[in-house]
Image (tube, helix red, strand yellow):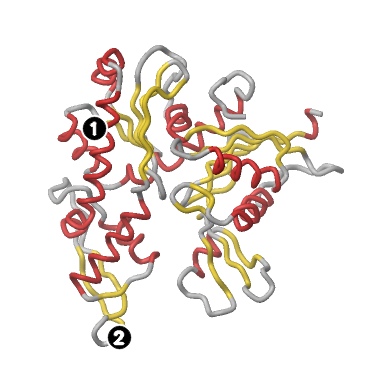
Amino acid sequence: MGLFTREIAIDLGTANTIILYNGKVMVDEPSIVAIERSSGKIIAVGKKAQMMHGKTHENIKTIRPLRGGVIADFQATEHMIRAMIKMIDLGKSWFPPALKMVIGIPSGITPVEERAVKESAEQAGAKEVRLLHEPMAAALGIGIDVLEPVGNMVVDIGGGTSEIAVIALGGIVTSKSIRIAGDEFNADIEEYMRKQHNIQLGERSSENIKIEVGAAMADIDNPPPDYAVHGRDMLTGIPKEVLVNSAEIAYCLDKSIAKIEAAIMNALEMTPPELSSDIFETGIYLTGGGALLRGLDKRLHLKTKLKVHVDEDPLRAVARGTAIALKNFDKFTFLIK
């Protein structure tokens, strides 16, 4: 049966879904689908649907099927997984190949939500599915030997959730999952621009601001140039342009980042003393899209007095970890059946 089995690793993220096949990233698309209201037909998935987001007429709706790291729309998720798997060339065969999958999921997910992820994958054609908690996947992805009796702290800031976990001996010793991450940052920026500049923005525009001038603290090395934002003036209703800088964005993201800091401090408090001494040596590993926020590593270092390491490619750390887990499908006991 090995001839007909194809192995796929999926990082099913709130903001982006990444699929690896044969150890290579084959799909890296936004987790979004566009649906025709009248027929319920899927029009676009991923980047094409993202381009339609916030620009649709009444017969087309765009859905982000995952919210806060969990499946909010079961059917749309299934369609999305199916469409993204079709983007991979699985090779020619007479029979549809049996798919073996490892999927990264948030650590704070409930058993019901776990089952929803599994069922979505099975509906999309998976014969065997294992689930892997994202902090564990992130640790594998950045090259930590998770089976060693050494404590490592991983902070994975994604689109929907921030996952904080202390890992040792192939298990998560303490973990904290909070629903404050990239989406919350976007909402903060939207609200700030509305109150401060009287300008109404969409989700995509606030995401662009975060990427271009987002920062975790006002005084950062090499601040980016001011960024021109276009939106609707709330008083006149006419489109207008406003310039924003990284210090402004640092100010508006401050409260959300403070909550992530509090969660990290909380996880450190719950860590057994022997592992705390390990973490003092190894430091904190930052992964996920949120790790790209300018000055976040410096801010966390000032708060915790620990070394903070940012992975070279933090966006794909979880995806790489799920691919490593796939190679050790039967060996790793921490994979959830």
C-alpha separation, residue under disc 2 versus residue under disc 1: 44 Å
Amino acid type at mark 2? Gly
In the image shown, does 179 or 310 lie closer to the viewer?
179
> Which residue is pictured at 52% across the width and 37% down the height?
104
> Which residue is pictured at 35% across the width and 18% down the height?
151
In the image shown, does 36 or 219 lie closer to the viewer?
36
Amino acid type at mark 1? Met
Q: Is residue 227 above or below residue 271?
A: below
- Rendering quarter of residue 282: top left
Q: Position of residue 96 (x, y in %)?
A: 80, 44
User: Which disc is residue 177 wearing?
Assistant: none
- Residue pointed to by mark 1: 265
- Rendering quarter of residue 231: bottom left
Looking at the image, residue 251 sits to the left or right of residue 201; the answer is: left
The answer to the question of whether label 2 and label 1 lie on touching residues, with beta carbons closer than 8 A, is no
Q: Is residue 141 above or below residue 247?
A: above
> Which residue is pictured at 32% across the width and 42% down the height?
291
Q: Earlier in the sequence, mark 2 or mark 1?
A: 2
Looking at the image, residue 139 sits to the left or right of residue 132; the answer is: left
Where does the N terminus fall, quadrant-wise?
A: top right
Q: Secondary structure at mark 1?
A: helix
Please name which of the two marks, 2 or 1, marks the residue nearer to the observer: 1
In the image shown, does 247 or 15 lie closer to the viewer?
15
Q: Position of residue 198 (x, y in %)?
A: 22, 76
Where does the C terminus fall, quadrant-wise?
A: top right
Q: Is residue 148 above or below residue 224?
A: above
In the image shown, does 64 or 294 lie closer to the viewer?
64
User: Which disc is residue 237 wearing?
Assistant: 2
- Rendering quarter of residue 145: top left
Mark 2 nearby-residue class (10 Å; few <14, some 14–19, many ≥20): few
Mark 1 nearby-residue class (10 Å; few <14, some 14–19, many ≥20): some
